[in-house]
Amino acid sequence: MGHARRPKPRRPGLSRRDFLKRTSAAVLSFGAVPLLQSCGGHDAGAAPAPAPVPGTSDQIAFGHGVASGDPLFDRVILWTRITTTSAAPVTLDFVVARDAALSQIVRSGQAATDLGRDHTVKIDVDGLQANTTYYYRFTAGTVNSPIGRTKTLPTGDIGRVRMAVVSCASLAHGFFNAYRRIAERADLDLVVHLGDYIYEYGSGEFGDVRPYEPPNEIVSLSDYRTRYAQYRRDTDLQEVHRQHPMVAIWDDHEFANNAYAGGAQNHTEATEGSWTTRVAAATQAYYEWMPIRVVDPANLRKNNRSFAFGNLVDLLMLEERVNARSMPLMTGSPVAPLGTFTQSGAFTDPARQILGSEEEGWLSDKLRTSTAKWKLIGQGVMFAQLKVRPATNANGGGTFANSDQWDGYQPARDRVYEVLKGNPTSPAVNNVVILTGDIHSSWAADLSQDPNNPDVARGGYNPATGAGSRAVEFVTTSITSPAIGDLENVTVAALELINPHFKYIDLSERGYMLVDVDATRVVSEWWYVDTVTSVSNVQSLGMALQVQEGANHLIAASQTAPRPNPPALAP
């Protein structure tokens, strides 16, 4: 196990920052600069103190706030944790009301918790009305929790869905200003978290603005619980959970960097024990601390699930890490330096999985049978092709940059494209929008199997008109985790020349996406905070793009208007 003062050696494989640095170097090394020319501190400090809660003689408090998640049309998960020095079980009460004053109570009851579940509490409250905002509170003895706010999903004809989309919150790299800005938006239906909710590293191993608890890399159940507890003492993270329900999936850092079913780049069994044991510890802590439902008690690695927003949106959340993913192929070749690769050899093996056959079948069925206007897919790693040397598929497809994303699993991606394109027995699936995190930067893409082929009639893509695109992808930047800014201007221009299907790339800003859906279009807005190294309330709109109904490609958009007169935020 690593320690802050004696960090363990770096292992082979790319971190996100390594990937972005190396991609910029690879782009330049493959002659992108001539193409371009032809076209024209904050001091480290301790973690935030627990939120102030009135104390009692038995030393019970709600130091980690409240949260809600996985809303359905008639129910929602409510979460809290009892902060106590006692090892004794704790019984607490809860109420759910239609008003922030908690005078119109619609549900109430009791729950119990103990050390076996790290004193966390999760209640699946049913019997609620669809498309309704509720307020809730827990009480233990004479101590009240903060009041939380949540919302159920709608049914029937729906005019609009509005959500924030986030990923990648490295506490060691700064302050969660973006979470606070999201919490202030009273008109959201929910927050979608696409993973890397926590990071596994020890203090000083990846970022040094805030130290970690525990200071070592987390491996054991106690370690993972302690890290979640530290994150959930952060008042900005508490506030986004308190004001909005969250639908979350994990990516790799909830376990270890570049995780897959059989291991991770950042895991060494000889010194850190069994990978199976580590995954079991990480998943147990995740389900204890996150307001989500267990999909399969017999297999906690399964995390894919779906959410229906009436007839407007089906939101499909994918698990892509520890259930079935094959080991990423991370070695380069003499003609593809810096970890880049071509679609040859083992990369073409159709048996290599990112979802696994069961989840892949589930996704195919959901897409083909959905009656919603829009199919939104929430998932961890970039689906669009990302190349550092262009070529059509007939000429090998070019050179790719990151084998940890879907580029490293092209046969699996092709099977998704076959669903989108349709066949004689299954019609094409339109109006698909993929929402992605992971890469600590902002991207928007038309999705084509052969984006460097201009012959649309032969499966290619026209970047001027969008013809040949089968779906679109919006990629959110990170809450705090670093990308690259020093070569941004050169790299972005070069990447756009090599990858004409990308319609927006920003490699330096931190923040979140705001996704606004109605029957005619899906708009993504990229909102950026001005800093993560100190507390700030400044944000700005960076870009807005949209896909119109039936078009399957991106065009420019304007900023969307907030909902008028949304329900009040929790006091």
Image: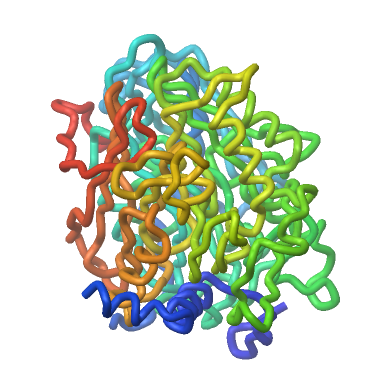
Residue at 35% of width from left, 46% of height from top?
Answer: 240
Q: Position of residue 237 (x, y in %)?
A: 39, 53
Residue at 70% of width from left, 39% of height from top?
Answer: 302
Label count reads 0
Query: In the figure, residue 216 lies in which quadrant?
Result: bottom right
Query: Which quadrant does the N terminus fall into?
Result: bottom right
Q: Position of residue 211 (x, y in %)?
A: 48, 76
Residue at 64% of width from left, 52% of height from top?
Answer: 410
Query: In the figure, residue 301 lies in which quadrant?
Result: top right
Viewer-closest of 435 and 249: 435
Residue found at the far top of this picture: 156
Q: Position of residue 197 (x, y in %)?
A: 51, 55
Q: In the visual, does 463 lie left or right of 101?
A: right
Q: Is residue 232 visible?
A: no
Q: Is residue 106 above or below residue 203?
A: above
Q: In the visual, does 263 lie left or right of 19?
A: right
